[in-house]
């Protein structure tokens, strides 16, 4: 299992040519490498010894063993990572006011924190094993950025929008989780390929828009404001929801095939990246809508 992330390239769901065994339950007597993302992991146990439902939905699960990842591990690590984001966001909101006397300093710190978070996330994305310290440090710097940006939007553009964006993000998470658990969303190779292609196209458009805004001023091509801003914001939220489904698939596969417990940190890292993505897009859409009232 590797961490998922709408911005950076995923290193694959498994060690089987970069994909997990989508909808391919292990069959007795079949080759392990074809469906087991952890077949080459020396810590993994035989996934064919037992079949039962996983925590996210019906499917095979490896026998319980010491040191294997569980849903409790994923929930705990995700709670720690998101808790760090929330804590530093609140502290930066309080300690880095965006009033006219301090706005330049606050924005400068926010941009610096965002760049540090970007570097840390890239480092973790390319590491073979998760580093809890690195992931928590990313969460801390990401929280600083989110706190200042949220404070600025709430102060100058749309008061009260932050709570709405948080509730909207929680609603998307709950909706995707229910849809995934009920198997209304089925993560297949085609689904994975479509989401990745759409995400790369979306990011490229946003990068081009950013370059035009830097050199031409304003909002560049207009993809992040007005009617187009709402449209692309909604597309961003939908992409984030799709990445949540991919994250849930990774967690399900990790539990089913006996991934080592340390992999739960990668699951937490991926879920945090995706939820931050959804929150920022939700914040943008709601702020545009309220600004047009």
Image (cartoon, rainbow, N blue to C red):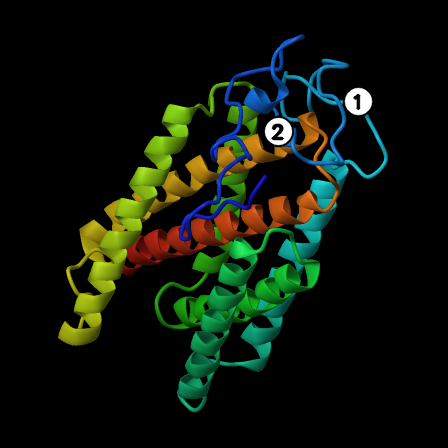
Q: Which is more N-terminal, label 1 or label 2?
A: 1
Circles 2 and 1: CB atoms closer than 8 Å: no
Residue 101: name its quadrant.
Answer: bottom left
Question: Residue at coordinates 41% horizontally, 25% vertically from top-left?
Answer: 189
Q: How many marks?
A: 2
- Tell me what residue is drawn at x 40 percent, y 67 percent: 153
| Point 49% across, 60% down: residue | 122
Tell me the distance, in whole angstroms, between the alpha carbons under discs 2 and 1.
13 Å
Q: Is residue 246 visible?
A: yes
Q: Residue furthest bottom?
A: 101
Mark seen at residue 194: none
Q: Quadrant of the N terminus?
A: top right
Q: Position of residue 85 (x, y in %)?
A: 60, 61
Q: Secondary structure at mark 2?
A: helix
Relative placement, left or right, of 132 versus 18 is right
Between residue 84 and residue 136, name the one nearer to us: 136
Query: Residue 2 occupies which quadrant of the picture?
Result: top right
In the image, taking residue 44 as reference, residue 65 lies left or right, namely: right
Q: Quadrant of residue 86?
A: bottom right
Q: How packed is label 2: few (under 14 Cα within 10 Å), some, or many (20 or more)? A: many
Residue 292 rendering spot, x and y as whole percentages: 24, 57
Query: Label 1 crowding class (10 Å Cα cut-off): few <14, some 14-19, many 20+?
Result: some
- Identified at 79% across, 22% down, the residue is 63
Q: Which mark is residue 253?
A: 2
List the single residue furthest toward the top.
28
| Residue 148 seen in this snapshot | no
Which quarter of the figure is the C terminus placed in?
Answer: bottom left
Residue, disc 1 = 63
Please name whichever residue, 45 or 275, is drawn nearer the observer in this view of the structure. Answer: 45
Question: Residue 109: percent from the left, percent from the top?
Answer: 48, 81
């Amino acid at each position: 299992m590797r961490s998922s992330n709408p911005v950076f390239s995923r290193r694959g769901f498994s060690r089987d040519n970069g994909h997990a065994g989508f909808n391919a339950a292990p069959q007795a007597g079949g080759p392990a490498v074809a469906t087991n993302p952890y077949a080459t992991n020396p810590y993994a146990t035989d996934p064919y010894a037992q079949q039962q439902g996983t925590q996210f939905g019906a499917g095979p699960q490896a026998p319980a063993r010491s040191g294997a990842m569980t849903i409790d591990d994923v929930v705990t690590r995700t709670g720690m990572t998101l808790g760090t984001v929330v804590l530093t966001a609140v502290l930066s909101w309080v300690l880095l006011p965006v009033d006219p006397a301090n706005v330049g300093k606050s924005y400068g710190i926010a941009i610096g924190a965002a760049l540090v978070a970007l570097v840390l996330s890239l480092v973790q994305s390319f590491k073979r094993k998760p580093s809890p310290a690195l992931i928590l440090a990313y969460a801390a710097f990401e929280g600083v950025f989110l706190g200042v940006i949220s404070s600025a939007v709430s102060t100058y553009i749309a008061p009260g929008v932050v709570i709405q964006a948080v509730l909207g993000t929680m609603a998307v998470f709950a909706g995707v989780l229910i849809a995934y658990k009920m198997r209304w969303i089925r993560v297949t190779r085609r689904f994975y390929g479509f989401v990745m292609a759409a995400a790369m196209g979306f990011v490229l458009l946003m990068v081009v828009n950013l370059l035009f805004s830097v050199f031409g001023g304003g909002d560049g091509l207009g993809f992040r404001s007005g009617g187009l801003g709402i449209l692309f914001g909604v597309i961003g939220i939908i992409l984030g929801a799709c990445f949540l489904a991919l994250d849930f698939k990774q967690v399900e596969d990790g539990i089913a095939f006996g991934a080592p417990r340390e992999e739960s940190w990668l699951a937490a890292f991926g879920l945090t990246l995706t939820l931050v993505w959804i929150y920022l897009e939700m914040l943008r859409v709601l702020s545009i809508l309220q600004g047009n009232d």
